[in-house]
Amino acid sequence: MTLDSHSPLDGKRLLLIIGGGIAAYKCLDLIRRVKERGMTVRVILTKGGEQFVTPLSVSSLSGEKTYTDLFSLTDEVEMGHIRLSREADLILVAPATADMMAKMVSGIADNLATTALLATDKPVMIAPSMNSQMWHHAATQRNFAQLQKDSILVIPPSSGDLACGEVGEGRLAEVEDMVAALESFFTPTGPLVGKHVIITAGPTYEAIDPVRYIANRSSGKQGYAIARALRDFGARVSLVSGPTSLSAPRGMAVINIESASEMLAACQNALPADIAICVAAVADWRVASEATQKIKKQDGELPPLQLKENPDILESLARTTDNRPSLVIGFAAETENVSANAKAKLARKGCDWIVANDVSTIDGQSVMGGDHNRVSLITATDTENWDNAHKHEVAERLARKIENHFK
Ligand code: CTP
């Protein structure tokens, strides 16, 4: 149960490196606060950090194993330092001690924390904390400046009473300030911020019996590419996906379903939305009554399958009277008379735009499952042809069109 399911931290992964400073205790509260907001937190506790907080207290709050030792055989087997450093959306070093900052500047990798910092391909943020003389020392300030040049993000220290009894700058930022810095880092930016989009993608599976189903060749690649493009434009994305072999894109709600009826229910559940894009290859038919037991061969005869029409998700979203997304976009998979058939679909289903998708082969390669697509964007007034483009390019162009529409 999270505090706010729409927190920008929801679904994000933090690797927290707790350094050796008295303020390490604040990190225990930090872990709680970000977890309440839906973040997952893995922690590397440095040897110095272990002097102030214990692996047990950290694990009790993070709900994860706490990593301490670079040369631990079990850690390397379970989760090497490379994976640890890459399976995060952000690394936060708090408290970042003078020693840790100096090591980061020099690229020293003499323990698990510094090795992970060197091995990572993810953004790194530091929250410095130390005695104010140490903070103002020329060496620390030089290192601090260099770290910023190296694109390290900073949560600046505050002024006040220090643990050593002195007063000055060097206190670790308060927990709420660290949470705010993380939220601001993860707050989406882009032309579609504030817009919610529902995207259907992939095939649907219509069960015949517990082991068999009716499916189609859709890979989900085009729908997933559109979901990523719109996320990158700042939109809040709900991706309703049939079974695919693609990994779930980060930074969006992915709702996995199997059948067309489940897809419709998931879309209705995700309303209200500003935009709906139906990219899924929904099965037009389902088996009238799904067998509860595996259907056996009967004298070599195929038992007849009674089929029933599936709900049309695109049409139902386009024709809904309350909560209609202001822009409803469909895809039209066609193998012949592409433009004419697509225009007829646009009118029949009541959507605003349709992307006519020529699913015959491109250079002998099937569009279904391939990386390229041949589409035309058809609106009430216009047709644009986007010839043989990579599915990412189609996604990007569609996102730009949507941006212009809402301008
Ligand atoms: N669609 C849908 N629900 C269905 C069938 C289709 O939402 N039950 C959507 C698809 O996601 C796509 C559009 O409708 O956006 C057109 O799908 P397509 O398969 O091309 O057309 P059909 O309506 O199935 O018509 P036909 O099979 O006759 O071409």
Image (cartoon, rainbow, N blue to C red):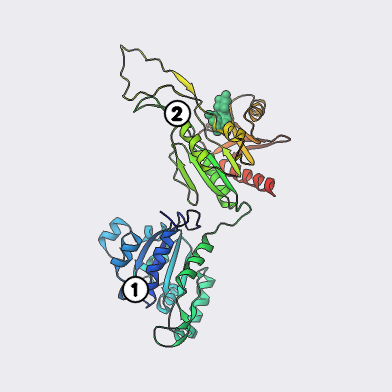
Question: Residue at horizontal 66%, vertical 26%?
Answer: 344
Relative image position of residue 259 (x, y in whole percent): 45, 32
Mark 1 vs 2, N-terminal side: 1
Q: Is 252 on the left or on the right of 23, as rendered?
A: right
Residue reaching furthest to the front: 322
- At label 1, counting other C-alpha atoms closer than 10 Å, the crowd grade (few under 14, some 14-19, many 20 or more) is many
Q: As rendered, which of 242 and 307 lies closer to the eye? A: 307
In which quadrant of this rendering is ligand 1 seen? top right
The residue indicated by pointer 1 is 49
Residue 258, placed above or below residue 67: above
Residue 273, placed above or below residue 159: above
Relative image position of residue 233 (x, y in whole percent): 59, 51
Q: As rendered, which of 271 and 401 lies closer to the eye? A: 271
Task: Count numbered badges in the picture.
Answer: 2
The residue indicated by pointer 2 is 215
Displayed quadrant of residue 356:
top right
Displayed quadrant of residue 50:
bottom left
Q: Which mark is residue 294?
A: none
Q: Considering the numbered disc 1 on the image, is that residue within a helix, a strand or a loop?
A: helix
Can the viewer see residue 291 in this picture? yes
Q: Amino acid at mark 1?
A: Gly
Displayed quadrant of residue 161:
bottom left
Residue 181, placed above or below residue 384: below
- At label 2, counting other C-alpha atoms closer than 10 Å, the crowd grade (few under 14, some 14-19, many 20 or more) is some
Can the viewer see residue 361 in this picture? no
Q: Is 272 on the left or on the right of 167, as rendered?
A: right
* Distance in Å between CA atoms under marks 1 and 2: 54 Å
Relative image position of residue 81 (x, y in whole percent): 35, 61
Residue reaching furthest to the left: 73
Relative image position of residue 257 (x, y in whole percent): 44, 37
Question: Residue at horizontal 51%, vertical 38%?
Answer: 201
